[in-house]
Each structure stands twice: as structure tokens, then as C-alpha cells.
């Protein structure tokens, strides 16, 4: 795109205020692409900036990942109308961003996760939740998120029942798209054979993450 990418070591969660950091960085950059733990800190930073900011990931949401997947779905299906999405994984930034997408697009989002790991009702909005893996069988798109890192033995046993396997995918719609979110841990949220299943589209789909980010950058820089 003709730009220059400069890694910046400043952290929004350090001792400086985000307003001070924004003031310095506005001197040199036309766009800020940011990963930081808390969305609230990123929102404050973006509000203080004159330049636009791109949310590359927070612990609260991961919009670029979801927009990239939606761009891939559009390339395959030609529409998002009535898209049925199964999000297999715990409450986290991936599930949150799919719930956010469902608020503005005609999507039917179902979270599939063990009991006790579902997103709170106020975060899900109209989206449903189940601990039954049969819930993925009517989905057009299946995505995953990684397991929590602090599971005890009971938690591991519960999540094993929500692992996507080739056998699960065989029972799904013949045109289902399986797009697990990287980094993928084979043997946890997905099985080895699921990653080799014909429905698995993750290498092709993740190319659209860069396309989506480039499109955002082009759109906002054009307004600067």
C-alpha cells in the first residue's frame, strides 16, 4: 500500500496516560494499529488521537478476526444474509466479537461451550448458548476459540466434550465452512482429523484477515 510500518514499544497499560501517549504518536503516524489487554484503554487512546486507530486485539474483543472471516464468507457465499454461526469456545474476545457482529448484521450466532463458561446474557444479547455439540450441525460457519489456560481436571473433561472432530463435521451441512481461530491447539479445541477435513477452510479464510485490515486502513487514511 506504499506505507511504512514502524513497531512502537509504548504500552497503553503503563504509567503514562493514554492521552500523553496519543499526543506524542500523533506527531509521527497516520494510523495506529494496536494490541492491548483492555478495550477500555484502547477506546480512551483512540478518543485522544487525531489519527485513526485499528483494534488488532484486546482481551475483550477481536473485531479484525471476525471481519476477516466474514469477508471470506462473502467471497464464498456472496452474502451474510441469515448466516448461521457456531462459536465453539468459552466466553472471550472471539465470542464477544461475533455477538457484536450479530447486533448489526443478519447473523444467527450460537455459542457452544461447557456450562459455566458461557458469555453472560447481557453480552450475548439475542444469541443462544448450548453445551451440546449437536448445535453445530446446522451451522453455515463454525469457528473456535482456545481453551482457558487455567482449567482443572473437571474443566478439561468438560471441554473435551466440546472438541470439534471430523466425526462432528461429517454430521454438519455439506457446505459448512470450518474456520478455527489461530493459534489452533490440535488435541484441545480441535482434533487432528478435523484440521484435515474437507470442510476446514482456515488457510484460505485467514488470508482475508489481511484484506480486511488493508481495506480499513485505506478507508480511514483516505479521510485523514
Image: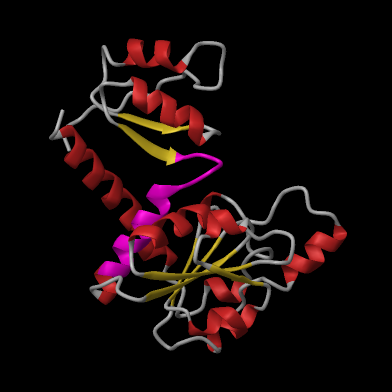
Image location (x, y in percent) of residue 136 = 55, 78
Does residue 206 show up? no
Image location (x, y in percent) of residue 210 = 31, 49
The residue sitting at 78% across, 67% down in the picture is 158
Number of numbered tags placed on the structure image: 0
In the rendered structure, the answer to whether residue 205 lies left or right of residue 77 reads right
| Residue 146 inside the magenta-drawn segment | no
Image location (x, y in percent) of residue 26 = 28, 16
Image location (x, y in percent) of residue 222 = 13, 35
In the rendered structure, the answer to whether residue 137 lies left or right of residue 115 reads left
Decide whether the magenta segment is chiefly helix, strand or loop: helix
Q: Nearer the viewer, residue 68 or 130?
A: 130
The residue sitting at 37% across, 63% down in the picture is 205
- The extreme left residue here reads 222
Give the residues in magenta. Answer: 57-74
The residue sitting at 18% across, 33% down in the picture is 221
Amino acid at each position: 500500500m506504499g506505507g511504512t510500518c514502524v513497531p512502537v514499544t509504548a504500552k497503553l497499560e503503563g504509567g503514562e496516560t493514554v492521552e500523553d501517549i496519543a499526543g506524542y504518536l500523533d506527531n509521527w503516524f497516520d494510523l495506529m494499529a494496536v494490541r492491548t489487554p483492555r478495550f477500555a484503554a484502547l477506546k480512551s487512546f483512540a478518543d485522544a488521537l487525531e489519527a485513526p486507530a485499528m483494534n488488532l486485539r484486546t482481551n475483550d474483543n477481536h473485531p479484525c478476526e471476525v471481519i476477516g472471516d466474514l469477508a471470506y464468507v462473502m467471497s464464498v457465499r456472496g452474502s451474510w444474509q441469515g448466516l448461521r454461526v457456531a462459536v465453539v469456545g468459552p466466553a472471550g474476545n472471539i465470542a464477544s466479537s461475533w455477538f457484536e457482529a450479530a447486533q448489526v448484521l443478519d447473523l444467527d450466532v450460537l455459542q457452544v461451550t461447557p456450562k459455566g463458561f458461557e458469555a453472560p446474557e447481557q453480552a450475548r444479547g439475542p444469541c443462544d448458548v448450548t453445551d451440546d455439540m449437536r448445535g453445530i450441525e446446522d451451522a453455515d460457519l463454525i469457528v473456535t476459540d482456545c481453551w482457558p489456560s487455567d482449567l482443572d481436571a473437571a474443566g478439561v473433561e468438560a471441554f473435551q466434550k466440546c472438541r470439534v472432530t471430523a466425526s462432528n463435521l461429517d454430521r454438519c451441512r455439506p457446505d459448512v465452512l470450518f474456520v478455527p481461530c489461530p493459534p489452533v491447539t490440535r488435541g484441545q479445541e480441535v482434533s487432528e482429523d478435523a484440521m484435515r477435513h474437507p470442510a476446514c477452510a482456515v488457510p484460505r479464510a485467514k488470508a482475508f484477515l489481511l484484506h480486511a485490515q488493508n481495506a480499513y486502513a485505506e478507508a480511514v487514511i483516505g479521510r485523514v
